[in-house]
Amino acid sequence: NAGVTQTPKFRILKIGQSMTLQCTQDMNHNYMYWYRQDPGMGLKLIYYSVGAGITDKGEVPNGYNVSRSTTEDFPLRLELAAPSQTSVYFCATSTLEGSNQPQHFGDGTRLSIL
Amino acid sequence: AQSVTQLDSHVSVSEGTPVLLRCNYSSSYSPSLFWYVQHPNKGLQLLLKYTSAATLVKGINGFEAEFKKSETSFHLTKPSAHMSDAAEYFCVVSDLYGNKLVFGAGTILRVKS
């Protein structure tokens, strides 16, 4: 019953460092998403993927990169961490069958850039 | 483009009293609408969704929402609040193809004993 697993749960980075946020799912969902959540702002879409090998930008992609080599994994990369990237990051998945399917969320990664 | 406005950033109710969380949407087509709940330090969980079937939608934990096209609203209600309902609630609209979501800013619900 793992669903969507995000690692790490917490991380503190220094400005200019890089890191990869991991997201893996065991539900065989084709669609995967990365969001960031800032206080009072709801969730903003960073990148999404409709299947292995296919990714596209969301609303706030600057400063991030993604890859999707398998159905299960969708890592998010920060190359040069900046204080503005301090946020809570959520990975989510949904099925391909039909539109308007609910998204399933991981528990988030809380990232601080100092 | 579609958008969502949650009219209250914070709502406080007493345990056992009704809950009303207000949401207005804007969409150029017939939208799909969702309510998600987020408990502290957790991901979001789907409460209910509207996809052009019945206008009154029932969800988990006794919540329901009514789609009113004339008012472009999708308010979330519950007849009697429980302490465990304390959380942040998000009203969400999907894009035309139903695969990308646009989130409201959230409403924090506080339940007093």
Image (cartoon, grey):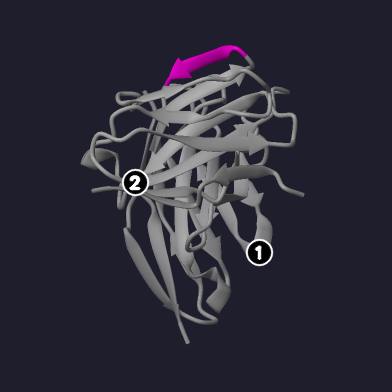
Q: Position of residue B43 (x, y in %)?
A: 54, 51
Q: Which residues are magenta?
A: A53-57
Q: Position of residue B40 (x, y in %)?
A: 47, 63
Q: Is residue B77 shown left or right of residue A104?
A: left
Badge 1 density bin: few <14, some 14–19, many ≥20, Cα 10 Å: few
Report helix, strand or loop for mark 2: strand
Report helix, strand or loop for mark 1: helix
Viewer-side label of 2, 1: 2
Q: Chain of mark 2?
A: A
Q: Position of residue A71 (x, y in %)?
A: 68, 23
In the current view of this chain or complex, which residue is farthest to the top? A53
Q: Where, quadrant-wise, is the N terminus of chain B in this rendering?
A: top left
In the current view of this chain or complex, which residue is farthest to the bottom? B113
* Residue A68 among magenta residues: no
Q: Chain of mark 1?
A: B
Majority SS type along the magenta span: strand
Determine which residue is flagged by label 2.
A87
Q: CA distance from mark 2 to mark 1?
A: 29 Å
Badge 2 density bin: few <14, some 14–19, many ≥20, Cα 10 Å: some
Determine which residue is flagged by label 1.
B61
Q: Of the residues shown, which amino acid type is indicated by label 2? A: Ser
The answer, for residue A84, to whether it is visible in the render is: yes
Q: Of the residues shown, which amino acid type is indicated by label 1? A: Asn
